[in-house]
Image (spheres, coloured by chain):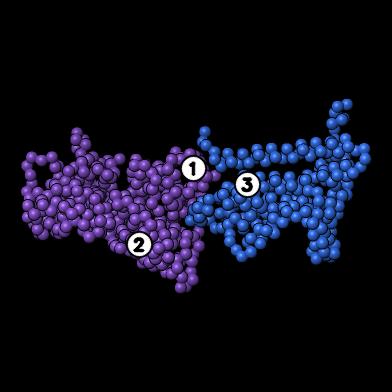
Amino acid sequence: MSGNAHHSTPGETHAPAGNALECRLRKRLGTFDLDIALTVPASGVTALFGESGSGKTSLLRLIAGLDRPAGGYVRLGERTLSDTQQKIHVPIHRRQLGIVFQEARLFPHYRVRGNLTYGMSRSGRARFDDLVALLGIGHLLERLPGTLSGGEARRVAIGRALLTQPRLLLLDEPLTGLDGERKRELLHYLVRLTREIDLPVLYVSHDTAEIATIADHLALIEQGRLAAHGQLDELMMRLDLTERLGGFDAATRLNARVVDHDQAYSLTRVVLDDDQTLRIPALDQPPGTPIRLRVGVRDVALALAMPGDTSYRNGLMAVIDAIEPSTHEPSANEVRLIVGRQRLRARLTRQACDEMQLVIGKPVVALIRSVAFGSRF
Amino acid sequence: MLFEAIALSDAEWQAITLSLKIAGSAVGWILVPGVAVAWLLARHDFRGKSLLDGLLHLPLVLPPVVVGYLLLLSLGRHGWLGQWLYQGFGLSLPFTWQGAAIAGGVMAFPLLVRAVRLSLEAVDPKLEAAAGTLGANRWRVLFTITLPLAIPGLLTGTVLAFARALSEFGATITFASNIPGETRTLPLALYTLIQTPGKEAAAARLCVLSIVIAMFSLMASEWLARRARQRLQERDR
């Protein structure tokens, strides 16, 4: 329903460490060389992010074993999947990877059920009903793929990949080509799914809003190289990456917890880790649910004191952490704030910064419109 | 009276059943190698691919008598292969219906391979790759994805090959001769009647029979292929 918030990642230490992916891969790609060393943590969603043609899909294909690298290795946990020096290249059908391609690639001559069970492992059988329910494809089981909508077909493809009990799930731009509503719906399923399943996910995308919704880690790829790599929350805080991570729509994320709902106004109150509260458009999660809020840098205004008569529903006590001229907009500064133990970004005109005499360490009030939370996701 | 006039004579029946048996066997023995070669050509690149492709098409362009003669040279009792077959297994192919089936099969082989190859090439390799990611090895991919999706072409190829074997004349008469009840198929029986004065009416009957059988097999193949296509693209009720 409301796509602007979702469950936050549970602690990242619970998952078996055995499924971390480690690779170093080289391959010639048209006009440039792909040369990337990457580690994908054993849990959570890692986004492979970059422009079209940056090499992210090629990297995914090399990891999957669909293409052979010119040099390098791929290790999943203890297992070596590729190693050009040791001349190891595990064939794709023995890699135990779940791969969902841009097109769903469902088998046209099998019904949905047949597609789902095609590669199903014995332990996958026990999860069949749960997974079908989780993906909302129970009513499609006896249909043929030709009759499915784009979003339905991709949900089936995701279920089909997961039922093989893979050790790593690779998603190659799974939302490409879907219209706005279908995209939102599938993203909603994906977010739910990635919180439920206990395996690492590698998610290829070039959409920052999509990534801000689903990813925990990010690998930024440019011209076949790894430009930045780490926790997405950290990278979103880096003012120097503004241009790459969203530009005009750059955003940050706040972790919060649902407190209560105001039925009359359709608002939900959430609390941050320092007990400050926010009002956001109503969510259907019960009190206590951890959620992740995406806050656009343009949706945050600053005041030196809490204003009296204002339509802003949210005022967070904050301290200025950094101010830098925006690389995106010559009239603006990118400002980083500390809110409790979290950080938040705002984009203000340089004029406002000068007139308010904003400097690092100055306490301010970060004003956020409630309706801004519903703007995109 | 009318029924008797239409009813088939023993000789005619013999020619028909023999033709069907020989053409059926011909298709039977080339089916697996034909599909295998088609798959090789459709899905693999290797040295000598164009040479193999050319060799395969030879029976289409060579005079059938030449093919029959080459068969006689290789599979005849003194041929390099025939000698081995005869001494090792007591098998002698020339002048037998099995020999006729081999001649028909050789002539039909390129047609089968062409049709199957085209339909295999039309199967999206991305689906095969997807099956691989689901843990299917090459054989499982072949039998669960590639071949089922190529069924329309497989049917067309089979019927084409069957029709070609049914109408085989030159290679058959050269390699297997024209023995009543053994190798005298419809075309050979027709040829014999034409050579015999006063048998024009009988020849005409065989001529009509040939047309009927050919039409029937064409319609059957069309129907089967359409059904297969429908199954592949079936819309839910």
* Relative horizontal placement of residue A216, taking residue B129 as reference (left or right): left
Report, in whole angstroms, how far the alpha carbon at label 2 lies from the one at label 1. Answer: 36 Å
Q: Residue at x 25, y 50 (%)?
A: A249
Which of labels 1 and 3 is toward the front?
3
Residue to which mark 1 is pinned: A145
Say what secondary structure mark 3 lies in.
Answer: helix
Chain identifier, blue in the render: B
Residue to which mark 2 is pinned: A223
Q: To which quarter of the image does residue A10 belong?
A: bottom left
Question: Which residue is outermost to the bottom?
Answer: A85
Label 3: chain? B
User: Three-letter amino acid code at disc 2?
Assistant: Gln
Report, in whole angstroms, how far the alpha carbon at label 1 lies from the one at label 3. Answer: 22 Å
Which of labels 2 and 1 is toward the front?
2
Relative to A183, residue A205 above or below: below
Residue B219 percent coordinates (x, y): 69, 37
Q: Is residue B98 visible?
A: no
Label 2: chain? A
